[in-house]
Amino acid sequence: MTEPEIPEDHPRYASLVTRHRIEAGVEAGITSRQGLIAQGRGEAFDYLLGERTLPSADAAERTAAAALLLADHPVLSVNGNVAALAPAETVELADAVDADLEVNLFNHTEERVRRIADHLREHGANEVKGLAADGEIPGLEHARGTVDADGIEAADVVVVPLEDGDRAEALDAMGKTEIVIDLNPGSRSPQTADIPIIDNLIRAVPNVTVHARELADEPPADLQAIVDAFDAEEALAAAEAAIREGTFSTRDS
Ligand code: PTJ
């Protein structure tokens, strides 16, 4: 079924569209097959969260916008799932906060980096980093630690959606401000993050953009106050509580 054929009033419309995009991403050589499994895990957590942006996630998304606007060199890291699920939205966020886009893959192949970069350009990106591969994240073996020297290696703030725990820890050890988008609050990546966003990527990315546009003219001191007031532990705890205490509504599968 192609995207337009899924009836919009289907109770699981958003989930079906998402699945279709991931499937199409695999077929186009953009998303890894492991990306399908990652998507399934994410869906389970999203279901438990009620497939909504929690108030605590919205606060994290606003804080992420403030941190990105304050950054000297922000970079949005794009993997195969991000490219399949939200290419235009990711390009739009990069524009709103003046960030670089860098393809950075867990299962790295040059071919897939190239395809993802092309895909982002088709969705409006100008420059896409990730092909130079002349930098490194120290402490990781070559393929998983390869980045661009003037991209992620030089960044002060990085957005890493759906990141592997080892790499999130290694980026943290480099002293970067890390913004992680992940539906699992128990995952090591959001637990390592300065700003964990426990929300579905497809809701989180556009909402960070909305906040960035609202905050664009705020003085740096006010943006800094938003960042300083944010409590990462509290955000993780709120998401975990919502998952553990949420009422299971009957929804069509
Ligand atoms: O394209 P590559 O090679 O860089 O590979 C990307 C994946 C995602 C396959 C790779 O990084 C991976 O294997 O990730 P993990 O370790 O499975 O972790 C994925 C995390 O993302 C899990 O905690 C999921 O719950 C979460 N997740 C999955 N889909 C979404 C999500 N979080 C937010 N939004 C989603 N749509």
Image (tube, helix red, strand yellow):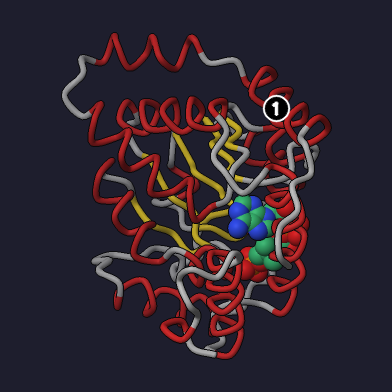
Q: Which x, y percent locates residue 26?
A: 61, 84
Task: Bin the neighbour count of mark 1 within 10 Å (Cα to Cα): few under 14, some 14-19, many 20 and up.
Answer: many
Q: In which of the image's four quarters is ligand 1 placed?
A: bottom right
* Closer-to-camera residue (237/64): 237
Classify 146 as above or below 140.
below
Q: In the rendered image, which quarter is residue 233 located in?
A: top right
Say which residue label 1 marks: 236
* Closer-to-camera residue (113/78): 78
Classify 201 as above or below 175.
below
Q: For the C terminus, which image quadrant? A: bottom right
Classify 8 as above or below 54.
below
Q: Is residue 154 left or right of residue 96?
A: right
Q: Which x, y percent locates residue 85?
A: 50, 67
Q: For the N terminus, which image quadrant? A: bottom right
Residue 246 visible (yes or no): yes
**Residue at left 25%, top 44%?**
96
Q: Which x, y percent locates residue 149?
A: 45, 53
Q: Amino acid at mark 1?
A: Leu
> Residue farthest to the right?
244
What secondary structure is marked by label 1? Answer: helix
Q: Is residue 180 left or right of residue 117?
A: right
